[in-house]
Image (cartoon, rainbow, N blue to C red):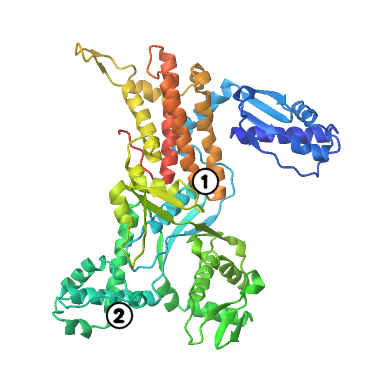
Amino acid sequence: MLKDFFLNEVKNAISKAIADNKLGQMGENDSYNLMIEKPKNPDFGDFAVNVSSLARVAKMAPPMIANTIVENISKENYSVSVVGGFINFKIENSLLANAIAEIIEKGENYGKPEGVATEKILLEYVSANPTGPFHIGHGRWAAMGSALANLLKFYGHEVYQEFYINDAGSQIQKLGNSLKIRVKQELGENIDFPTDEIERKNYYPGDYLIPVAKKFLENHKEVKSAQDVDAIDLRVYCDFAKAEMEACQKALLEDFRVHFDRFYSELDLHNSGKVEESYKELMSKSMLYEQDGAMWFKSSEFGDDQDRVIKKADGSNTYLTADIAYHIDKLRRGYDRLINIWGADHHGYVARVKASIEALGYDPNKLEVLLGQLVNLVINGEEVRMGKRKNMVTLDDLIEEVGIDATRYWMEMRNIDMTLDFDIELAKRSTDENPVFYVQYAYARVCSILRNAISEKLNPETGEKSPAPMSESEIDDLIKNFNKNLILKTADTAKSLILKLEEFKSVIVLSAQNRTVYTICRYVQELAAEFHSFYNSNRVICDDKDLMKSRLALMVAIKTTLKNALDILAVSAPERM
């Protein structure tokens, strides 16, 4: 990566200058932090490092520090200049040619870092109750989580994706009772859900259970009346509704390009004895105490703001009890890192789970929690409210309205800790204002250029055909036996574009390390803008064959980089639009 290369050049030069006693009072044990950036004025160079911060330690003026450092820099394939405390680097075209050669050589592997420390990661996300369709908030976690998994895998990590099914609480009984009412309605019974707001919270009155009720009656033809409905154990309704909801959720996730390695049932966790085992282990370590008939976990001893109840006075477990067992089970399965995506309303939950991990003898820093804000769905300028117990805007509805690509991209293009305003009308537009269209159109335009390079041209006035500018075999040879010197023909006019292509490598590293997906979206939008700008000013298919080959190689590099990035986002790369 060029940024790292130049930053390391500066750091190595600083070490040499210190060894030669040329950086004033600065010693080899003095710490410092330098950043590399693009100069605001491109005439100064392509990259710049501000070394003014060293003045405090070196007791020298920033320009003197910069000039001293530059004396120890090799300046091979690039030039160096000093402006104040800035060291500016201007790269030569040979480095640009090397960048394109690397992309063409590595293809689908371009951007994957080498020699980095990798981990075995368990990534848990979505983890919704199996009580209804996904709302659009779930869609954001699904898109962000799966894209993050793709990113971490691309980086080199081993990633296992898990969905924790919350199927052990009272919500399943509520679901069963709700299905029971819908079944009675299908049989013509004059019955409805309570109108009282408090009572209504004990049910799921959404219309999505109506087809489930119809299917239940198809599978239970012996049920003919309300009396028959009441004669069936509630557990039957609970199990049937849960199974239908899980099947619905899993099918939608697959359609949405979200692939979990395991759906982990909370009920199975309880039945396995692991919840009780964790409880007893905390007890054996004197991490629990009784108060007001309940059992409390001493989480405040491990950074939580207060102790937490894990067994109520009636003997039932709290949600935390199962979560403790689940996270310990994750660690005992041998993962180096646990990454959870939770809603921002779970902020206070992080400390207590980490406390339990530490209390049971594990490293709490192995758990990372990404807290995400919700989605505001905007239709015709108005925000649409969501909720299972009210009119619901489901993820399924949204995908049907704007498509999978637009839904995924919009869900991914903002940082997870920011509330997302999802503008449906804008997401549907086939204009440059719609970011996903803008990026996909760039990819399709590159593909069109490559097709036109090997296609006969038809004169619309005479009907005569002229030969294709190049043959398929020539294009294949251009890629397989790429001569990087070709790029020198177009390096000057394509410099900004090539530097943006080269930047992909550092974007991958920083995005993976910071667990950010939106930075990939921002990158492809910037790359698309660079390409459109280049295309509008330069003819790719032209009479100068060497120049044409040079620019076609550039098109291959753009296509490769965009495809690699869009694959991480799980957004399609259409060759025609």
- Establish if 102 lies above or below 252: above
Q: Secondary structure at mark 2?
A: helix
Q: In the drawing, what numbered circle is on residue 15? A: none
Q: In the drawing, what numbered circle is on residue 235? A: 2
Badge 1 density bin: few <14, some 14–19, many ≥20, Cα 10 Å = many
Q: Relative to residue 109, is residue 473 drawn left or right?
A: left
Badge 2 density bin: few <14, some 14–19, many ≥20, Cα 10 Å = few
Q: Relative to residue 234, is residue 420 drawn left or right?
A: right
Q: Give the residue at x 32% y 52%.
A: 398
Q: Earlier in the sequence, mark 1 or mark 2?
A: 1
Q: Secondary structure at mark 1?
A: helix
Q: Relative to residue 550, is residue 73 drawn left or right?
A: right
Q: Give the residue at x 24% y 77%.
A: 180
- The reply to whether dot 1 and dot 2 touch (C-beta < 8 Å) is no
Q: What's the distance in space between the residues labelled 1 and 2, CA to CA?
A: 46 Å
Q: Amino acid at mark 1?
A: Tyr
Q: Amino acid at mark 2?
A: Arg
Disc 1 designates what residue? 155
**Residue 447 image point, x, y percent:** 35, 29
- Establish if 313 lies above or below 108: below
**Residue 443 image point, x, y percent:** 38, 33
- The quadrant in which the C terminus is found is top left
Residue 60 seen in the figure: yes
**Residue 364 image point, x, y percent:** 61, 65
Residue 556 placement: quadrant: top left
